[in-house]
Amino acid sequence: MYGLMLAPVLTHARDEPLSILPTAFGSLESMRRKDETTEMTNDQLKRAILESMIRFGPKHQHRSTIIGGPGSRGNIEHHLDMDLSLDERAAAARMINELVEDCLLRPTFSDPIDREGWLEITDIGKARLALPLPRPGEAEGTKSPKDLRVQSVDGIAAILLRVLRENLSGQSRVDYHPGSLIDILGYEFEPRWQGRKIQGGVELLPGMARHYVPHRAPPELSDIFRRAVEELRSGGLIRQDREQRNENFVELTDEGSHAEILAGIIHYPREATFWAKRYKGGVLLIEGRTAEGDICSGTAFLAQGSLLATCAHVAEPAVHLVIGQDRFPVIAKVKHRVADLALLEVRGADLSSIQPLPVRVMDVNPPEPVLLLGYPRVPRHHPTVTAKETSVEAVSFDYDKKQLLRFADAVSGGMSGAPVLNRRGFVVGVVSENTFEGTGDGLPRREFTHGELSQPLVELLAMNSLPGR
């Protein structure tokens, strides 16, 4: 094992926080209440469903009890003290299916007649519940993008994908063909480029609304829109509508329907260089001194708010976060009781401009390609953030029955705490240790690098984000 030594001062009871999860309900205070008319986003609906599962537990709930119906409030409505519209109720039914598909809810199969009707929240669902909602303008189901003139191709592609999802799902009522790229450019993007307020092809003016008549899109908008369409096509997110002969009519693929959109970026399989450029700014250097006075180093990454994720053995009491020539003290906030993982809180450093790395619990299927971002120690060189492409050659158990990732290539010291990103740009593990194969007769030994899975890190983030922690 390399990096800093394990910090024995970090302790925490892993199964303690679940009893206080309901205290996180205040996160939906901005949602529409009983006498208001603003529609909820899909993310808010999902969160309300998960919160109601905790509040009205303790065990399973039936789908119909969660959603309710006209004249009979469901648990979501009781939890929020509001009545869902018909569209919101239908959307809630879809969101339940997505939560089941994402393993945040699961059927109990307890009713022999209606086996998939009764649901319970999973541990992953409890962990996801404590994570914050997406920032305004990033949530699924919003057609209010920031100024289009400052958007990159990736940002325009993300907005276009949101528009197509809303149009093709029937979630939005539009005055044009919902899958027509020409119409979307003319009715949605061109007027917003000019600073007009548009909803479904209808221009919203003070005291009135009128059908918008598209103009010729400016060349710079047409160019970036075309490139965004090419990105969605090449990424397998959209394809030509099979009921149309014109390639300007498109439909979503399964990937396009389910790929996550975070901070204006679509997370679908991309080259490692894209994710390295996107997230290397959130990977930071940790330095300290051993008990013998030697300088040692490791890697941490911004995982949520101002919380840094790293290995527990990197989190010695006397460590600093290094940014350029500045050093900021960090404190160990929580350590997993089994996994070699810890969260650190920064003192004095402003990390608000850094994009956190998204952590997810996802299957890792060897030989799956992954990207490691960290600060390896290189003789006679200052530590530099380094991107290492490798693959997971096995998901195995050590002698302590702990499940670990094993990489095809070994990495040097200093990489402890480095995030392991899959091709979708999600952190699925953390580099944790090196082991060595003993050989005889002067044969070179083989070095193995291992990593923790992301599940315990998600648990740490969930527990640490609860009010009062």
Image (spheres, rainbow, N blue to C red):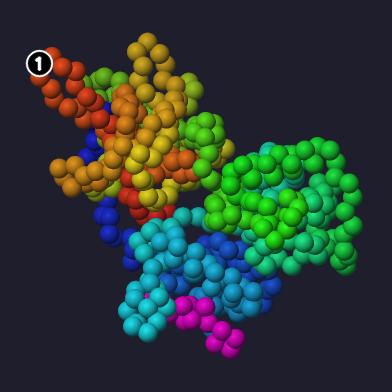
Query: In the rendered structure, which amino acid carries the disc numbered 1?
Result: Asp
Is residue 117 one of those drawn in magenta?
Answer: no
- Location of residue 167 (image quadrant): bottom right
Q: Residue furthest bottom?
A: 71
Task: Farthest residue to the top: give it.
Answer: 380
Q: Nearer the viewer, residue 240 or 212?
A: 240
Q: Nearer the viewer, residue 266 or 346?
A: 266
Q: Is residue 303 above or below residue 449?
A: below
Tag 1 residue: 441
- Given the current orientation, which residue lies at the most extreme front position? 245
Q: Residue at x 28, y 43 (%)?
A: 395
Among the 4 quarters of the image, the one containing residue 396: top left
Q: How far across and how far down the image is residue 58, in percent?
A: 34, 75
Taking the spot 47% from the left edge, 81% from the top edge, the residue there is 65
Seen from the viewer's position, the closer of residues 102 and 48 is 102
Residue 68 painted magenta? yes
Q: Is residue 292 left or right of residue 223?
A: left
Q: Residues within 10 Å of mark 1 (few under 14, many from 20)?
A: few
Q: Is residue 38 left or right of residue 74?
A: right
Q: Can residue 369 be seen in the rendering of this structure?
A: yes
Q: Which residues are magenta?
A: 56-72
Tell me the quarter of the image containing the C terminus: bottom left
Q: Name the element at disc 1.
A: loop
Front-lying residue, 215 or 383 = 215
Instruction: Residue at 74% x, 43% y: name it.
Output: 225
Q: Give me the residue at 56% from left, 84% from top.
A: 69
Relative horizontal placement of residue 336, taking residue 100 as reference (left or right): left
| Residue 188 in picture, x, y percent from top left | 78, 54
Figure quadrant of residue 333: top left
Q: Quick check: can you spot residue 357?
A: no
- Image quadrant holding the N terminus, namely top left
Location of residue 20 in the rendering, given as x and y in whole percent from the top left corner:
37, 65
